[in-house]
Image (cartoon, rainbow, N blue to C red):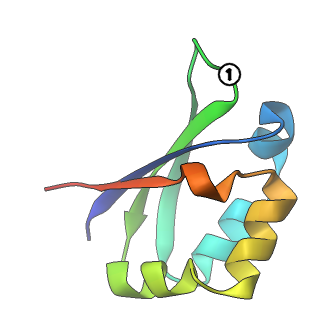
Amino acid sequence: MPTVMVHHDVKDTKHWLASPKREEALAGVGVTNIRTFVDPEKSNRVGLVMDVEDMDRLMAFMQTKPAADAMEYDGVLPETLVFLIQS
């Protein structure tokens, strides 16, 4: 099971940190052990480290309306999303 790091910008870091939507949405596609991070020098840049059961499934999910809705609710700026996969 690969470990994946994702970073992106958000509109409101406090809202993003408190939101349950991220785990609700990602759990449905086999993502576990989600840890959150905040850039201390640019507080609206945040990140996740997570274990991903199936990368193809996760990436297909990221193209769906439920993923877009979850990101919108969380205030994610989707154009800033960067995925890094453990090698």
Which residue: 56% across, 23% down? 39
Q: Which quarter of the figure has residue 57? A: bottom left
Q: How many marks?
A: 1
Query: In this view of the protein, can residue 21 be seen by the observer?
Result: no
Image: 44 above or below 83: above
In what quadrant of the picture does the N terminus appear?
Answer: bottom left
Image: 26 above or below 43: below
Q: Position of residue 47 (x, y in %)?
A: 53, 41
Residue 71 is left or right of residue 87, and the answer is right
Image: 79 above or below 26: above
Residue 56 is left or right of residue 72, and the answer is left
In what quadrant of the picture does the C terminus appear?
Answer: bottom left
Query: In this view of the protein, can residue 61 be seen by the observer?
Result: yes
The extreme top residue here reads: 41
Q: Residues within 10 Å of mark 1 (few under 14, many from 20)?
A: some
Which residue: 49% across, 66% down? 32
Which residue: 55% across, 84% down? 61
Which residue: 70% across, 62% down? 22
The answer to which of 47 and 29 lies nearer the viewer is 47
Q: Position of residue 53 (x, y in %)?
A: 36, 78
The extreme left residue here reads: 87
Label 1 sits on a secondary structure element that is loop
Q: Position of residue 84 (x, y in %)?
A: 32, 53
- Dot 1 amino acid type: Ser
Residue under pointer 1 = 43
Image: 73 above or below 27: above
Q: Position of residue 25 (x, y in %)?
A: 69, 74
